[in-house]
Image (cartoon, rainbow, N blue to C red):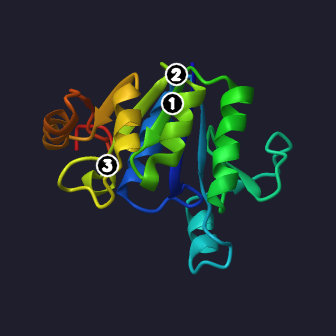
Amino acid sequence: MRVLLAANASYVPPRGGATRSNLVWLESLARAGHECRVVSAELPHEKSGKSKQIRDEEIEVVPEREAGAEGVTAVRRGQIRVYAAAEPHRRTRLLNDQIERFHPDWVLVSSEDLGQVLLGEAVRRAPGRVVYLAHTPQLFPFGPASWNPNPDGTRSVQECAGVVAIGRHTADYIERQIGRRPAVIHPPVYGSPPF
């Protein structure tokens, strides 16, 4: 199976709980033999601590002929290939390119997509194959916790083949707000039991 994750957060290096949770899920899929890729934001190289974090986490930066676009960095993180672009318009084009070239069976879109630009594009380009990864209610396009309510974004979430919430509380919130019952998958951020 081919899985493509789209997010407007940095995965080169990852910052925050949502990005790390998504990576744990992708690493698990990759270990099971699935081909996984990420389209993400990129931190500027001069950003304090980026180079050190990349070294500490042993992220291998590799030249990528397939990316082929100006302003796109390709990075291998274990078995996962990450394509990163700092500019949002390049990220959207990169997502379209990866959907067309990689032919993912599933496109996962993380809720860290303010304005739901990547989500809307994924729903248009890969209908029936998009799963919304619901991490942060403040970044959802709906509900009282939303910082930026967005009816178009809400429709995009409703059009997804599936919604995954990180816990029961978040799943209940989504069901109350848009009438979709998400699957609950707790990110295994602490590793595998026994602890």
Instruction: Give the residue number, with chain letter if any, for mark 3.
Output: 140
User: 96 above or below 23?
Assistant: above
- How far apart marks 3 and 2 lie (CA) works out to 20 Å
Tell me where residue 171 sits by quadrant: top left
Instruction: Give the residue number, with chain letter if any, for mark 2.
Output: 127
Residue at horizontal 57 percent and vertical 18 percent from the top: 1
Instruction: Give the residue number, with chain letter if any, for mark 1.
Output: 123
Identify the mark at residue 6; answer none if there is no mark: none
The mark nearer the N terminus, 3 or 2, is 2
Badge 3: how crowded within 10 Å, few (<14), some, or many (20+)? Answer: many
Image spot of residue 15 (x, y percent): 46, 62
Q: Secondary structure at mark 2?
A: loop
* Residue 31 in view: no
Q: Secondary structure at mark 3?
A: loop
> Disc 2 vs disc 1: Cβ atoms closer than 8 Å?
yes
Q: Amino acid at mark 2?
A: Pro
Residue at horizontal 59 percent and vertical 72 percent from the top: 50
Badge 1: how crowded within 10 Å, few (<14), some, or many (20+)? Answer: many
Residue at horizontal 74 percent and vertical 28 percent from the top: 101
Q: Amino acid at mark 3?
A: Phe
Left or right position of 163 against 123: left
Image spot of residue 160 (x, y percent): 40, 27
Tell me where residue 103 sits by quadrant: top right
Residue at far front of view: 151
Image spot of residue 25 (x, y percent): 42, 37
User: 194 above or below 126?
Assistant: below
- How far apart marks 1 and 3 lie (CA) works out to 16 Å
Q: Secondary structure at mark 1?
A: helix
The mark nearer the N terminus, 1 or 3, is 1
Left or right position of 105 against 181: right
Q: Amino acid at mark 1?
A: Val
